[in-house]
Image (tube, grey):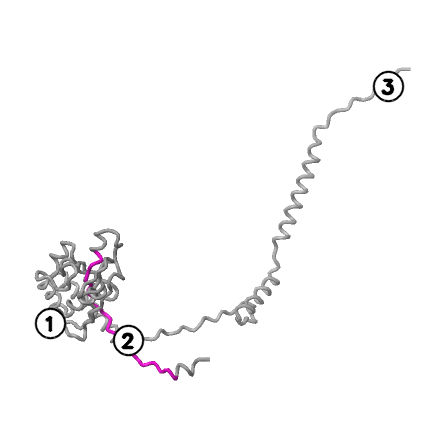
């Protein structure tokens, strides 16, 4: 008996549509879920926002609109400067102008020595500083002014005499020790040199109550004392013209201080 022939199966070329439809369905479901998650409940969000604002900023809530009512802070008017403050500022400005004129006049009278590098004029927040190398002022180990510099120092005194600024004259030495009958140490040498310049200023018309002389010996060097150039730089006389008038002192009440102690 002959076998029956089985019908030939044909390939289905449209099977991919099933997978494609499944993919599109999943993609649609994904976007639906994402949209649902991104939707915010406006009512609950507004309640949460109002609660946070009320708690942390202590701002009242407008009942009609449920929105925070921001109360602007009061504008504080800046106090106007008093007449005393204005007068004090005017005095300071006048003092600064006078100090600039003093510095200008000193630069003019000391111009030759400044060009030689023997004198430096510095302007600081406190006033004007004149730094003079002692090699042109004094002989080594001596405190007598060189005759050639007496005229220059008197020119400085003529500039300072009409002013009212306090003047401090400082004597400085290097660290090479000295021990003579007149100067047992650099302390005496620096102090006497400062006093010598002070006496010349006083004799030239500068009021004595404005003058102060101090000897620092080798305690305030401006250069290391290792080399000869550094030691020469440290041997100097410094004239400080102070723009700040010293305040009057106030006696300390010892009993009141003791009462405040625990």
Q: Residues within 10 Å of mark 2 (few under 14, many from 20)?
A: few
> Which residue is found at the position 19% from the left and 60% from the top?
236
**Secondary structure state at the residue bearing disc 3:** loop
**Location of residue 156 in the rendering, given as x and y in whole percent from the top left corner:** 13, 65
In the drawing, what numbered circle is on residue 203? 1
- The answer to whether marks 3 and 1 mark residues whose Cβ atoms lie closer than 8 Å is no
CA distance for labels 1 and 2? 38 Å
Describe residue 140's horizontal placement relative to residue 259 as left or right. left
Q: In which quarter of the image is the N terminus?
A: top right
CA distance for labels 3 and 1? 150 Å
Q: First in sequence, mark 2 or 3: give its number.
A: 3
> Which residue is found at the position 53% from the left and 71% from the top?
58
Is 137 located above or below residue 202 in the figure? Answer: above
Provide the residue designation for mark 2.
85
**Location of residue 56 in the rendering, given as x and y in whole percent from the top left corner:** 54, 68
Q: First in sequence, mark 1 or 2: give its number.
A: 2
Magenta residue span: 233-255
């Amino acid at each position: 008996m002959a076998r029956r022939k089985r019908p030939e199966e044909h390939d289905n070329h449209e099977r991919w549509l099933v997978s494609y439809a499944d993919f599109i369905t999943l993609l649609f479901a994904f976007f639906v879920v994402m949209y649902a998650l991104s939707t915010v409940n406006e009512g609950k969000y507004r309640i949460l926002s109002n609660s946070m604002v009320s708690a942390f900023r202590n701002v009242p809530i407008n009942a009609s609109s449920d929105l925070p009512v921001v109360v602007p802070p009061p504008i504080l008017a800046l106090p106007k400067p008093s007449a005393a403050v204005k007068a004090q500022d005017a005095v300071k400005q006048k003092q600064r102008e006078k100090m600039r004129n003093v510095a200008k006049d000193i630069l003019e009278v000391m111009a030759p020595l400044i060009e030689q590098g023997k004198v430096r004029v510095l302007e600081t927040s406190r006033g004007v500083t004149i730094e003079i190398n002692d090699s042109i002022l004094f002989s080594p180990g001596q405190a007598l002014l060189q005759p050639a510099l007496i005229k220059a120092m008197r020119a400085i005194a003529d500039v300072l005499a009409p002013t009212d600024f306090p003047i401090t004259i400082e004597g400085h030495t290097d660290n090479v020790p000295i021990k003579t009958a007149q100067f047992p140490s650099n302390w005496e040498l620096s102090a006497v040199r400062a006093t010598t310049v002070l006496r010349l200023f006083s004799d030239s018309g500068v009021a004595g109550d404005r003058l102060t002389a101090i000897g620092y010996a080798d305690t305030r060097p401006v250069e290391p004392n290792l080399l000869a150039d550094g030691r020469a730089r440290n041997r100097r006389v410094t004239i400080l013209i102070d723009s700040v008038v010293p305040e009057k002192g106030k006696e300390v009440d010892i009993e009141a201080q003791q009462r405040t102690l625990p």
